[in-house]
Image: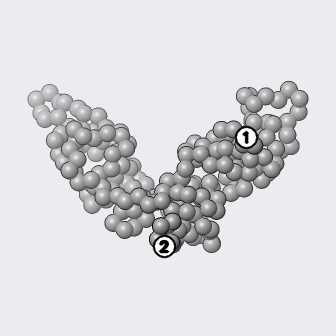
């Protein structure tokens, strides 16, 4: 059981029958009354965020989540197919379940899939991924620097990121999947 005194950002609990991740919390002591914990939580099934005030000392069961390493194989229509690398079992996730993460999925990318009661909930991408630039404006002219401004570039997976002016089509770049930001050119 996870008590309110054990709350921390990123902790996962079961609340009202659903798995939640604690985004933020604050212990509050009101005058003569008991202490409370103001908690901001994200529902891992729906993605919705709620704010609740919970009595201090209350206990919750852990969310009972399971994580599996899987490999992205391919997409077909609005379905994305992943394979467990140990059992070779394949699962299909819908485009809505992936959200913007689908923009960074390249065939054979290794991901972690979060399960709740045997049902796949969420895909965790690697922090950094290396992708080729499929389309961008021509390389900059003399005087362009890597620090100021930038230009949009469409990557091989369809994601659009802002890159320095010296990046051109065909270049391979490293991208942070959490922020969709360009990190560096890869040779």
Q: What colour scheme was applied to this rendering of the protein?
A: one colour
Nearer to me, 1 or 186: 186
Instruction: Kindly indicate the quadrant of the structure image that contains residue 8.
Output: top left
Q: Kindly give the residue lying farthest to the front in the view shown.
A: 86
Instruction: Kindly indicate the quadrant of the structure image that contains residue 16.
Output: bottom left
Residue 80 pos. (x, y %):
57, 67
On residue 99, the disc is none
Query: Which of pointers 1 and 2 lies earlier in the amino acid sequence?
Result: 2
**Residue contact between numbered discs 1 and 2, judged by CB atoms under 8 Å:** no
Q: Secondary structure at mark 1?
A: strand
- Quarter placement of the C terminus: top right
Whether residue 149 is visible here, answered yes or no, is yes
Classify 16 as above or below 81. Answer: above
Whether residue 121 is visible here, answered yes or no, is no
For label 1, the residue is 185
Classify 75 as above or below 15. Answer: below
Q: Residue at x 18, y 39 (%)?
A: 56
Cα separation, mark 1 vs mark 2, equals 35 Å
Q: Kindly give the residue lying farthest to the left in the view shown.
A: 32
Q: Residue at x 52, y 57 (%)?
A: 111
Residue 101 pos. (x, y %):
56, 55
Residue 39 pos. (x, y %):
30, 41
Does residue 107 appear left or right of residue 52 in this picture?
right
Q: Secondary structure at mark 2?
A: loop
For label 2, the residue is 89
Residue 120 pos. (x, y %):
43, 65
Q: Residue at x 30, y 58 (%)?
A: 64
Nearer to me, 162 or 156: 156
């Amino acid at each position: 059981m996870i008590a309110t005194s054990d709350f921390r950002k990123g902790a996962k609990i079961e609340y009202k029958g659903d798995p939640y991740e604690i985004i933020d919390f604050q212990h509050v002591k009101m005058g003569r009354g008991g202490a409370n914990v103001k908690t901001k939580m994200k529902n891992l099934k729906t993605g919705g965020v709620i704010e609740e005030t919970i009595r201090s000392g209350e206990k919750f069961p852990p969310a009972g989540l399971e994580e599996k390493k899987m490999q992205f194989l391919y997409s077909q229509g609005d379905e994305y197919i992943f394979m467990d690398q140990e059992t070779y079992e394949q699962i299909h996730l819908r485009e809505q379940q992936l959200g913007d993460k689908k923009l960074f999925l390249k065939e054979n990318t290794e991901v972690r899939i979060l399960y709740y009661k045997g049902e796949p909930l969420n895909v965790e991408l690697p922090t950094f991924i290396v992708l080729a630039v499929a389309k961008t404006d021509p390389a900059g002219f003399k005087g362009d620097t890597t620090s100021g401004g930038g230009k949009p570039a469409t990557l091989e997976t369809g994601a659009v990121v802002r890159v320095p002016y010296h990046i051109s089509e065909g270049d391979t770049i490293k991208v942070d999947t959490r922020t969709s930001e360009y990190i560096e050119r890869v040779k």
